Amino acid sequence: MGHSLSIAVGLAVALAPTLAQAAPQCRLALVMAMDVSSSVDSEEDRLQRGGLVAALTAPEVREAFFASDLPVALAIYEWSGRYNQELLLDWTMIDSPRALVEAAETVAASRRSHNDFPTAMGYALGYGAGVLSRAPQCLSKTLDMAGDGQNNEGFGPAAAYAEFPFADVTVNGLVVNAADYEAEVGLIAFYKGQVMRGPGAFVEVAQGFDDYERAMRRKLERELAPPVLGMDEAPAPAPKG
């Protein structure tokens, strides 16, 4: 009996580092993707880049970031053509107000990498899956795809979801609904039918780039809200009699 107990204690001690390493470092790994394809002109890019910075530093978003003891890990990239993705912010643990401000400052200081390529959303999603594959260990993963047009180069979202590791990823969308081009007429339906995926996925709509900050702020509040325990459980049956 004593020998068995000593073996059990020895196993517990040996497994302790492994269990510690397996503990999640954060509650959410959030990667945000910003559209810089040719349909986005320089003024629109200024509005969306500034809108993202303003949304990240808004009081309600800051409160949502720190609504739980576990922090959020954040990464941001911009995308356009097949091979035109640029990482603006690599994985950063938002574990203090200062870390959030520094992340926003990094985006504010960024410069657009491309401006004359089409909208290759499948490639952009694939790039995002790669970024998420090296994220810190978090309780959940979300990819936030923002854009003002439908896929018009290369494979589409369905092929990306079939070929890249998206099994445990929720994809939300932010549609910039300017309707300046024929391809944008059905943009909201495209995002809802082909882009959003996973449990709790949703699409937020900005009515033009002037509305980008408001839509981004609203979307971030919703994404960052800690899940309510038991919200997916079926209600208990009412007592009989």
Image (cartoon, rainbow, N blue to C red):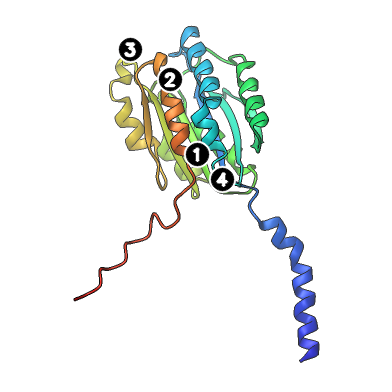
The amino acid type found where label 2 is placed reads Tyr
Rendered residue at 63%/42% (across/down) = 135
The amino acid type found where label 4 is placed reads Ser
Q: Quadrant of the N terminus?
A: bottom right
Q: Secondary structure at mark 2?
A: helix
Indicate which disc, 3 or 1, sits on the residue closer to the N terminus.
3
Rendered residue at 53%/16% (across/down) = 50
Q: Position of residue 22 (x, y in %)?
A: 67, 57
The amino acid type found where label 3 is placed reads Asp
Is 141 positioned to the left or the right of 208 in the image?
Answer: right
Q: Quadrant of the C terminus?
A: bottom left
Rendered residue at 64%/31% (across/down) = 97
Q: Nearer the viewer, residue 123 or 40?
A: 40
Q: Position of residue 203 (x, y in %)?
A: 37, 33
Q: Is residue 134 above or below residue 77?
A: below
The amino acid type found where label 1 is placed reads Leu
Disc number lying in front (3 or 4)? 4
- Give me the disc on residue 212: 2
Q: Position of residue 155 (x, y in %)?
A: 44, 32
Disc number lying in front (1 or 2)? 1
- Give me the disc on residue 180: 3
Disc number lying in front (4 or 1)? 4
Rendered residue at 67%/29% (across/down) = 98
Q: Secondary structure at mark 4?
A: loop
- Give me the disc on residue 224: 1
Is 176 positioned to the left or the right of 98 in the image?
Answer: left
Determine the CA span between mark 2 and mark 3.
16 Å
